[in-house]
Amino acid sequence: MATNFHSDLPNDQIHAPKDFSVASNSSVLVKSDSGDLQWEASLFNLSTTVICGADVAGVLHNSFFHIFFSKTLSIEAHFSVTGDATAFVPTTGFTQAAITIAANDTAIQVADAIKVELDRLASSAVAAFVTTVNGSGQCTFSGMQNTNDTVDMGTGFVYGNTRTPYGNQSLVSNVGVLSWEEKTDPAVTSLTTTGTSGVSTLSAGVLNVPNYTSLPVSYLSQNIEGFGDIELGSEYGMSNAQYNAEHKFTVNLGTSPVSDISPKFMLYSSIWSSPMSGTQLSGWNGWISGTGTVVLSLLRATLTCPIVGAYPSTIPVCRVAQETVTLLGNNSPICFNHSSFLTCEGFAQDFDVNETLILSAYCTSETASFNINFNILFKI
């Protein structure tokens, strides 16, 4: 009869857990709700550094690499050498980014061209990249969160990806699904309560509760219905409900896509105002029907309260989520669902007190007419 000696093996003869070598730092091995073993990585910011090479007689034309900006946005960045008419064949499911260079450009010029294209994506609110070059052919870009590493698909350049965990995080279970979530330390020095299950003590931001493994997370949900009839060229904010309790896209925020708005328009088009610091946007989903192609966006806008110094004429907005929908008619509503959101420069991950949320829309055809019903979920 066979005998199992595995339990008697010394440490230097026992293999590491499954996939240990490819697991991310700050990750744990868990059995998922579907019964599979997987490495659950903590929340992280991703930065990629590309060490570029020079082009040789246009050889870089149509070579490309993949950037996974978020779980819902994948970008295919390809090189286009001026004068070469060979068409690039895009990969289905990727947003396209064309990096224009000239034949025989140096590594420095190639890196500069990558920065120009990623800056364009950031300024057009496609993806909030932060991109730098070092003057020697190296380009570094960041802004990606909790997603896959940037991957070379044939350029031959050297790619380095750095994952940096952020915030204070805990591994929690939501309806049996394990995931990392960022936690805010309670602003309490000491609190002691006594109950039937024992004594619970909160001291210096650490909570010890008998018979409980984690603190509950509170959520706030808001449902809104509205409609719009908008024209090409402007971005419209959803106005506050009128006397008939309808929300309409009637606040003209400016030329689309906007990067700042007036404080007056922030007030007119705010659909929600944060009641406390530390609130986080957790979900945005809904249905939309009508005609035309509509670009929906959730915008964050903040104004110091109380006002210090001169009153500003404009304030910046952060486009935390965007959805482009080609409508199929009133009888064929289209759904959308977002559970991850961008954080712009100058905006914290958490909402400040009195920070507002705006739903905006602009069209890419002559006009668009639509009805929308959506939910916003906040974690508090």
Image: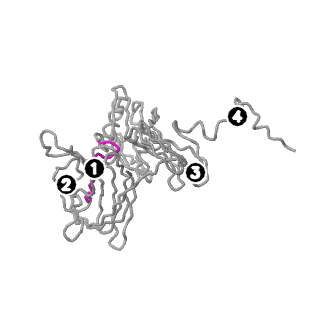
From the top left corner, tell me how far across and down residue 127 is, in percent: 34, 46
Residue 59 visible (yes or no): no
Start-end of magenta stretch: 347-363
Q: Which of pointers 3 and 4 lies earlier in the amino acid sequence?
A: 4
Q: Residues within 10 Å of mark 4 (few under 14, many from 20)?
A: few
Judging depth in this view, the residue of 135 and 221 nearest the camera is: 221
Kind of residue at disc 4: Ile
Query: Which residue is identified by label 2?
Result: 267
Kind of residue at disc 1: Arg
CB contact under 8 Å: marks 3 and 4: no
Inter-mark Cα distance, 3 to 1: 34 Å
Query: Which residue is identified by label 1?
Result: 300
From the top left corner, tell me how far across and down residue 48 is, in percent: 42, 35
Q: Residues within 10 Å of mark 1 (few under 14, many from 20)?
A: many
Relative placement, left or right, of 259 versus 14 is left
Helix, strand or loop for disc 4: loop
CB contact under 8 Å: marks 2 and 3: no
User: Which disc, if any, is residue 14?
Assistant: 4
Residue at 16%, 43% (x, y): give it.
307
